Image (cartoon, rainbow, N blue to C red):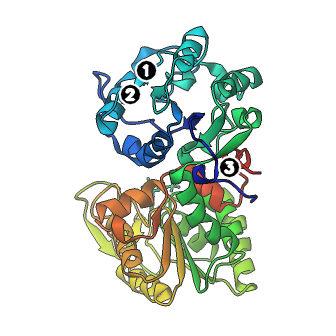
């Protein structure tokens, strides 16, 4: 990956600074913000720009209005919340393009904050339309990306417009993500452990390939483990298995054994006859699951095997739950892994999504080095893909 400037490396003094933020907040039916975490997360970058007397132009998407104006998805309520958090007027532009927006921006004074209306009210945003990108670019002198959750999307505001702005870089949120994810892919410290879980091998194939280049040990949990175990000749009962991926799983197993990366699979499971809260469950004696039963979580022997494997790790990256963590008691393995990471002295990185909710649920989020804010974006980053929203910032 090439070099990216931080907002601090760019002279933004008194300039018009367009910041692509992620204000895609959960909203209440009355149009007010239900959870302001994403707004709070963007405050350091916004406040820094204000402190430089910049004219701060904020833009985001909210929900899926599908390229049409739909006031159910207006950002007005977000603007009101932002004003409250900044303790300062936020000028709401009621649109993100056209004469009205031009005149709002032209009338901005230094230190003013303008919030544009939902970018996805125009289909040109997601289509990464060139003319729309140029229109957005004309609003500003400097382009800053601080919406990590969308950097894997090639949209006009996340990638397209950067080409037409001379000065560009990232805000503090994106910078923290890149600073923490980059070493995992490019220069991990060893021993380097990778923990992968979730439903499907097929969804994690690319990340297995990429991270196994450098991993010393890879620990697998979740339903994807059953595809590997079935491929290895074990009985998996009626557990979730991707039968069309058995050959692929066999190839991965043999590739690992030739390579020096240790592949660890569960050695026992929590099983039940069906997936239901309160259902009778039991622990298997070994890898095998009897007919009529399904594996819903990793068992106690697996947890201690994984604990041992992580003991000396210097770097650990984790993506995907170890079981059906949405349903008790099948959340135990996932929560235990969250605690193992919290206790570890390693540089610990969590790739967003379900694993991020698990560390919150286990109450250990603060003891993890980095919990990514973008599930899809961080998974694609860990797959070694070039993310359009980051490539667009390179110089
Ligand atoms: P993913 O989006 O691929 O990370 O998968 C997450 C989903 O995998 C969660 O909704 C889990 O409930 C599901 N999952 C994890 N382990 C199992 C399992 N043993 N059986 C069925 N689903 C599982």
Q: Is residue 123 above or below residue 334?
A: above
Tell me the quarter of the picture where residue 340 sits.
Answer: bottom left
**Element class at badge 3:** helix
**Marks 2 and 3 close (CB-CB < 8 Å):** no
Dot 1 crowding, Cα within 10 Å, few <14, some 14–19, many 20+ = many
Tell me the quarter of the picture where residue 162 sits.
Answer: top right
Tell me the quarter of the picture where residue 364 sits.
Answer: bottom left
Which mark's residue is nearer the viewer, 2 or 3? 2
Residue 226: x, y in percent? 53, 68
Decide which of tag 2 and tag 3 comes sooner along the chain.
2
Instruction: Residue under label 3, please give it.
Output: 390
Relative to residue 199, is residue 79 drawn left or right? Answer: left
How far is mark 3 from mark 1, CA to CA? 28 Å
Relative to residue 185, is residue 65 drawn left or right? Answer: left
* Label placed on residue 92: 1
How far is mark 1 from mark 2, CA to CA? 7 Å
Residue 82 seen in the current view: yes
Residue 133: x, y in percent? 70, 26
Considering every residue shown, the one lying at the far top of the view is: 99
Decide which of tag 1 and tag 2 comes sooner along the chain.
2
Please state the total of marks drawn on the protein image: 3
Identified at 33% across, 64% down, the residue is: 330
Relative to the observer, which residue lies in front, 335 or 282? 335
* Label placed on residue 79: 2
Relative to the observer, which residue lies in front, 289 or 222? 222
* Label placed on residue 123: none
């Amino acid at each position: 990956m090439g070099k990216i400037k931080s907002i601090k490396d760019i002279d933004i003094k008194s300039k018009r600074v367009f910041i692509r933020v992620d204000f895609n907040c959960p909203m209440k039916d009355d149009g007010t913000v239900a959870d302001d975490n994403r707004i709070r997360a963007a405050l350091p970058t916004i406040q820094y720009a204000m402190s430089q007397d910049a004219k701060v132009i904020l833009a985001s998407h909210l929900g899926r209005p599908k390229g049409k104006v739909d006031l159910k998805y207006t950002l007005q309520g977000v603007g009101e919340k932002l004003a409250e958090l900044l303790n300062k007027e936020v000028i709401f532009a009621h649109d993100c393009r056209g004469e009205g927006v031009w005149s709002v921006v032209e009338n901005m004074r230094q230190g003013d904050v303008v919030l544009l209306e939902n970018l996805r009210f125009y289909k040109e945003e997601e289509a990464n339309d060139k003319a729309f990108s140029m229109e957005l670019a004309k609003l500003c002198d400097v382009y800053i990306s601080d919406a990590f959750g969308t950097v894997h999307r090639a949209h006009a505001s996340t990638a397209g417009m950067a080409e037409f702005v001379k000065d560009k870089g990232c805000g503090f949120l994106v910078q923290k993500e890149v600073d923490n994810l980059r070493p995992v892919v490019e220069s991990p410290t060893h021993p380097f452990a990778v923990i992968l879980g979730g439903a499907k091998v097929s969804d994690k194939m690319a990340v297995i390939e990429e991270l196994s280049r450098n991993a010393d040990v890879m620990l697998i949990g979740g339903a994807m483990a059953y595809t590997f175990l079935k491929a290895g000749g074990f009985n998996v009962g009626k557990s979730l298995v991707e039968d069309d991926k058995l050959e692929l799983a066999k190839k991965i197993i043999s590739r690992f054994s030739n390579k020096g990366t240790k592949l660890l699979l569960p050695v026992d499971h929590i099983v039940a006859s069906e997936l239901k809260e309160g259902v009778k469950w039991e622990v298997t004696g070994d890898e095998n699951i009897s007919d009529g039963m399904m594996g819903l979580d990793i068992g106690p022997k697996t947890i201690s095997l994984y604990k041992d494997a992580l003991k000396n790790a210097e770097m650990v990256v984790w993506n995907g739950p170890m079981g059906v963590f949405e349903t008790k008691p099948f959340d135990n393995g996932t929560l235990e892994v969250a605690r193992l990471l919290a206790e570890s002295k390693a540089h610990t990185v969590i790739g967003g999504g379900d694993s991020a909710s698990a560390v919150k649920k286990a109450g250990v989020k603060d003891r993890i080095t980095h919990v990514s804010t973008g599930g899809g974006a961080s998974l694609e980053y860990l797959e070694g893909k070039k993310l359009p929203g980051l490539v667009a910032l390179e110089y």
